[in-house]
């Protein structure tokens, strides 16, 4: 099997886009740069494809039929690359090298390096990561206006989105159900520095055109169940491509209508990945928290001591902002909580790597000792 690690990483930006008449996958994000880096895989007889859905050891991929050049969807086996950890296994949005001649069915022979990836910590006490979507340019964080938005949860989603390497956009859905949507948007904007916050109604069409303009390239939609992610997908796709259900009237909580992550081609250009509702949004380390709370990070630069813990240290700019009300205590508490989570994940990741190194060293030592006991 071809080793994808030998292929240099690349960006799926639209700056090097190809004529879709000559390169059918251009509509899915394939670029001239992608074509160049795929050359070694093509020489090995493999075909470029994008994964649109993954399900139980198999996936649906879209590719150009070698015989006709037309786009088609093929079912492929992922077991040859599916024995890796949850982060490196095939995911919706991945670019793949497919062996169409494999028996008994086409097989994913390798995954191309990802430009971005939305990774969350798996539920529970485990510290493993799970990829929600790969090679994403924009992350739409959907929150419903049918109930008061949970600012702390939005901050958590923002940290997740920033960490992916993609651009986050907050979408406040179901604007037709409230009269103070702009007031709520102002509150959300205050905890989302540098992020576009949109008010949208699929029912009336409010904000939909602006939303379309914010979703070039590959877009992923994340959020809790019932906030209208699948409805957004249908509106942007211009068709009922995803099933939807009504949220419960008593608490506006939704049901898990979407059960898999699925990539949809948009009529105006680009693709959209709808994801199942997330009950738990565990962070997987990195710089996402610092970027989501850039206002606090900026305040911290004014502290007297560079290693200020923002507690009782003299000359603490963060504590001064808390005292005069410039920085709400709720936001500071959220920042500290997510920071602790991120640091815990980082420590567990380091411990996991150290354990792997130790196991590898034990195997090597055992092998050396075994050779030393063999008589000539």
Image: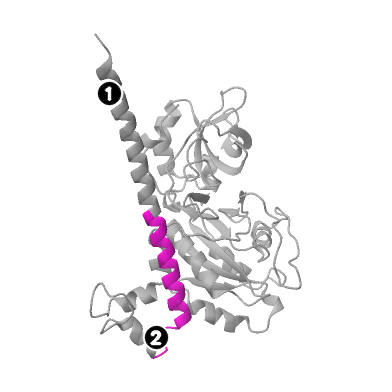
Q: Report which quarter residue 372 is drawn in.
A: top left
Q: For mark 2, does the 10 Å Cα neighbourhood hold few (<14), some (14 to 19), or many (20 or more) residues? A: some
| Between discs 1 and 2, the one toward the N terminus | 2
Question: Which mark lies nearer to you, 1 or 2?
Answer: 1
The residue tagged 2 is 322
State the mark number for residue 237. none
Check the picture and name the quadrant holding the N terminus: top left
Image height of 231 relative to 21, above or below:
below
Residue at the bottom extreme of this rendering: 324
Indicate the colouring scheme.
one colour
Name which residue lies at 39% across and 38% down.
37
Q: Is residue 100 left or right of residue 341?
A: right
Secondary structure of the residue carrying numbered label 2: helix
Image height of 95 relative to 219, above or below:
above
Q: Is residue 354 left or right of residue 56?
A: left
Q: Nearer the viewer, residue 203 or 286?
A: 286
Residue 4: x %, y % from top left:
41, 35
The residue tagged 1 is 369
**In this rendering, does residue 334 appear at all?**
yes
Would you say the residues marked 1 and 2 are in contact, meaning their CB atoms lie under 8 Å apart? no
Q: Is residue 120 left or right of residue 288?
A: right
- Verify whether residue 112 appears in magenta: no
Check the picture and name the quadrant holding the C terminus: top left
- Magenta range is 324-347
Q: For mark 1, does the 10 Å Cα neighbourhood hold few (<14), some (14 to 19), or many (20 or more) residues? A: few
Q: Nearer the viewer, residue 359 or 309?
A: 359
* Magenta portion: prevailing SS class: helix
Residue 196: x %, y % from top left:
50, 71
Separation of residues labelled 1 and 2 (CA atoms): 62 Å
Residue 43: x %, y % from top left:
42, 26
């Amino acid at each position: 099997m071809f080793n994808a690690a030998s292929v240099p990483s690349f960006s799926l930006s639209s700056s090097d886009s190809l004529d879709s008449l000559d390169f059918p996958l251009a509509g899915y994000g394939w670029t001239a740069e992608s074509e160049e880096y795929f050359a070694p895989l093509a020489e090995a007889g493999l075909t470029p494809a994008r994964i649109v859905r993954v399900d139980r050891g198999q996936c649906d991929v879209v590719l150009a039929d070698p015989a006709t050049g037309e786009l088609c969807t093929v079912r492929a086996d992922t077991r040859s690359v599916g024995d890796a950890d949850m982060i490196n296994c095939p995911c919706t949005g991945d670019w793949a090298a497919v062996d169409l001649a494999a028996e008994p069915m086409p097989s994913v022979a390798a995954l191309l390096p990802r430009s971005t990836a939305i990774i969350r910590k798996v539920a529970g006490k485990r510290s493993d990561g799970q990829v929600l979507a790969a090679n994403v340019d924009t992350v739409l964080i959907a929150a419903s206006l049918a109930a008061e938005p949970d600012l702390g949860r939005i901050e958590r989603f923002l940290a997740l989105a920033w960490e992916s390497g993609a651009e986050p956009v907050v979408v406040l859905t179901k604007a037709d159900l409230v009269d103070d949507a702009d007031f709520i948007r102002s509150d959300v904007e205050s905890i989302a520095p540098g992020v576009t916050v949109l008010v949208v109604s699929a029912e009336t069409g409010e904000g939909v055109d602006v939303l379309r303009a914010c979703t070039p390239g590959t877009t992923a939609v994340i959020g809790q169940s019932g906030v209208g992610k699948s409805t957004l997908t249908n509106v942007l796709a211009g068709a009922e491509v995803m099933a939807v259900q009504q949220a419960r009237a008593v608490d506006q909580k939704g049901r898990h209508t979407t059960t898999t992550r699925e990539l949809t081609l948009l009529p105006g250009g680009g693709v959209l990945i709808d994801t199942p509702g997330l009950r738990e949004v565990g962070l997987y380390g990195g710089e996402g928290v610092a970027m989501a709370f850039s206002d606090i990070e900026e305040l911290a630069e004014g502290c007297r001591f560079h290693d200020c813990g923002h507690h009782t240290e003299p000359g603490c700019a963060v504590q001064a902002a808390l005292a005069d009300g410039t920085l709400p205590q709720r936001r500071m508490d959220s920042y500290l909580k997510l920071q602790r989570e991120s640091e815990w994940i980082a420590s567990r990741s380091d411990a996991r790597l150290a354990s792997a190194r130790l196991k590898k060293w034990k195997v090597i030592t055992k092998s050396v000792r075994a050779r030393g006991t063999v008589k000539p």
